[in-house]
Amino acid sequence: MGINPFGNSEILRPVNPWFIAFSLMAALLFKFIPVDRNWVTPDLLALVLVFWNIRQPRRIGIGVAWCFGAAVDVHSASVFGEHALAYTLLSYFAITIHRRVMWFSPMMQAAHIFPLLLAAQAITVIIRVMFGGTFPGAWIFAESVLTAALWPLTQFLLLAPQKLPENRDNDRPI
């Protein structure tokens, strides 16, 4: 038996494009929930974008990331392009490393995407400060740590519909 680059011996079904759209829209709606600025909340939209950029780089790309970033910019009334630039760069670098990341376990994958999430968040903070905002403090970067820590759970949830059924059918070749 050969080495499986995806870290397990399961064969996944093709992903349903409607499920990709649903997961991205659910993450966007979660991003729209108003929270107190003193709370650290994970950026689920960035996490789901990175997941689909790694798993399906030909379906979810930089243009999709820019559109979702622009929607977040409009909703949050921040500098237009702040999140769009961050999500675009996040998607670009996720697509760049997607083949390498797939070789590792979910915890090591989280370690690989953490710098991407941190850089994307740093971009939004830098743009906000450049346009007259105040630096919120270093605690704001705990969001990237929390978001990366949710990677194994996100991977489990978003891959669940693609898993093949446990009961094998003798008439099916796979």
Image (cartoon, helix red, strand yellow):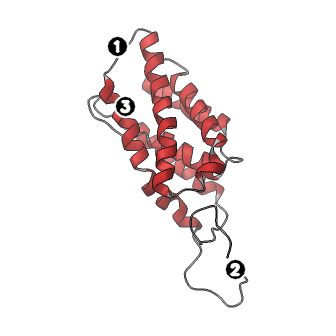
How many residues crowd mark 3 within 10 Å: few (<14), some (14–19), many (20+)? some
How far from the left and from the top, in percent, is residue 108?
A: 48, 52
Is residue 68 shown above or below 147?
Answer: above
Residue that sits furthest to the bottom in the current view: 170
Q: Amino acid at mark 1?
A: Thr
The amino acid beneath tag 3 is Phe
Q: Quadrant of the C terminus?
A: bottom right
Please, what is the three-letter code of the amino acid marked with disc 2?
Answer: Ile
**Residue placed under numbered mark 2 in the picture:** 174
Disc 1 crowd, CA 10 A, few/some/many (<14, 14-19, 20+): few
Q: Gap between marks 1 and 2, in whole Å?
A: 57 Å
- Disc 3: which residue: 141
**Which mark is first along the chain, 3 or 2?**
3
Image location (x, y in percent) of residue 24: 54, 46
Q: Are marks 3 and 1 in contact (CB under 8 Å)?
A: no
Residue occupying the point 46% across, 28% down: 75
Residue displayed at 65% across by 44% down:
60
Question: Split into 4 quadrants, where in the image is the N terminus?
Answer: bottom right
Tell me the residue that label 1 is attached to. 134
Asked if residue 69 lies left or right of residue 122, the reply is: right
The residue under the point 43% across, 45% down is: 148
